Image (spheres, grey):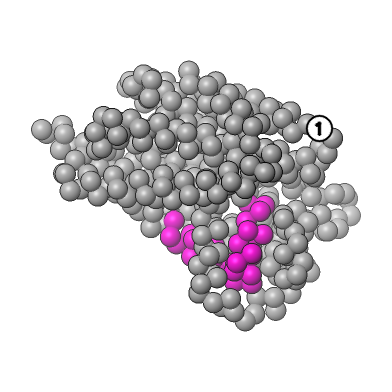
Amino acid sequence: MEMTKQNNLLTSGQLIFMIIQTQIGVGLLGLTNQVHEDAKGDSWISVIVAGLLVQVFISIMWMLSKRFENQTIYDYLPKVLGRYIGTIIHFCYVVYFMLVASFIVIQFSKTVQNWVLIDTPRWIVMGMMCCVCFYLVKENLRTIARFFVLVFFCNIAVIVIAAYAYIHVNFLYLLPVGQEGIWNITKGVHRAMTSFAGYEMLLICYPFVGGTNKQKFKAASIANLFTTILYTFAVLTSIIVFSPPELALLPQPLLYMVKALSFTVIERPDLYFLSLWAVVAATSFMGYTYMASRGLANLFQAHSSHQRAVPYAVGITFTLAVIFQNPRYLYLYQWILSASDYIFVIGVPIILLLISVMLHKSQVKERIG
């Protein structure tokens, strides 16, 4: 166990990239369209408010994790909720992570097929994604984190490419600020919350990160700050480039915006943009697959290595993606995931924190007892 933990030990800096890359995924392209349905020109406000709320939930996760600083959520669930209820919630978390991973694969394959591989069967694109991610997820956590650090610079490239659109913008589309009212902005916040999911990685990686509790909290906060800035930039840029009627018709405004750009030596810049986004989306899938595989390993053999569970996690994820790719099921699938986000990312950690505080349960207390 000590050897495994030593191999998985991350720096607080690597934790930043682990959370960022798990948060930023397929939601980057469709976020503007989803939030714009309710908040219209105030969509950027909804994204900022969502980022602030996420910071509150990160604080809750941090307070919970530091009470069990040498254990993942899978380890202390039975201690807080009891063996049977804890095991049930443990299993539900694994299912939730695999459902999110499969949704990422579905959205990824849908986008790639619509823009590039029009005649390629979608299951082939899904299979390619799963195979590539399987190759990395089967490695230890430190190796995964190093890859996430490397891939992070794709986000910077995405920002640079999108920034060229500021040559043709109209800031008047933002006015008047607050025009949609508090209710519609609030509904926009609800739409944006799903795209921010991924910070629950803190519940899994916390015991494998070196440094003090404050350093870990700072790392998670920096990660969320970057994600909030990137999402706000993406939404704000889309709003000032396209008129409101145009924006309502574009499912992925960023891609259409980049496609319209003209460069002297580069043709179809949207394909370069899509290539960078594909790598970012892959890391999000890897993050959720890692969390699911570690949960599977703990479920069937306490403290076992997650590598043995990776083939099962990837296989189940691929199967779910193939089954639910039908548009008739996809809307229901998305609704279920949206509700599950509030349950597993927000609700359960809050309940665990309250119970552990009321019952004075913590790793320190148990060692003393």
In the picture, measured across the screen, residue 364 lies left or right of residue 174, that is left
Position above or below: 24 against 204: below
Whether residue 294 appears in this view of the structure is yes
- Dot 1: what SS? loop
Q: Position of residue 16 (x, y in %)?
A: 47, 45
State the residue lying farthest toward the left: 369
Q: Which residue is mark 1?
A: 120
Quarter of the image that includes the C terminus: top left
Which residue lies at the image location 42% right of the left edge and 36% below the top edge? 93
The residue at 24%/38% (across/down) is 80
Q: Residue at x 83, y 39 (%)?
A: 118
User: Mark 1 belongs to which amino acid?
Assistant: Thr
Residue 361 place in picture, x, y as percent:
19, 40
Give percent across and percent down for residue 25.
Answer: 60, 45
**258 magenta-colored:** no
In the depicted structure, whether residue 263 falls above or below residue 277: below
In the picture shown, does residue 60 fall above or below 127?
below
Q: Which residues are magenta?
A: 28-54
Q: Looking at the magenta stretch, what is its main secondary structure?
A: helix
**Residue closest to the eye, 256 or 220:** 256
- Marks counted in the figure total 1
Specify whether 85 is left or right of 113: left
Rate crowding at label 1 as few (under 14), some (14 to 19) or many (20 or more) other CA atoms within 10 Å: few
**Is residue 91 positioned above or below 230 on the image?**
above
Give the image quarter of residue 164: bottom right
Q: Is residue 241 left or right of residue 13?
A: right
Specify the quadrant that holds the N terminus.
top left
Residue lying farthest to the front in this orientation: 328
Answer whether residue 209 is visible to the viewer in this image: no
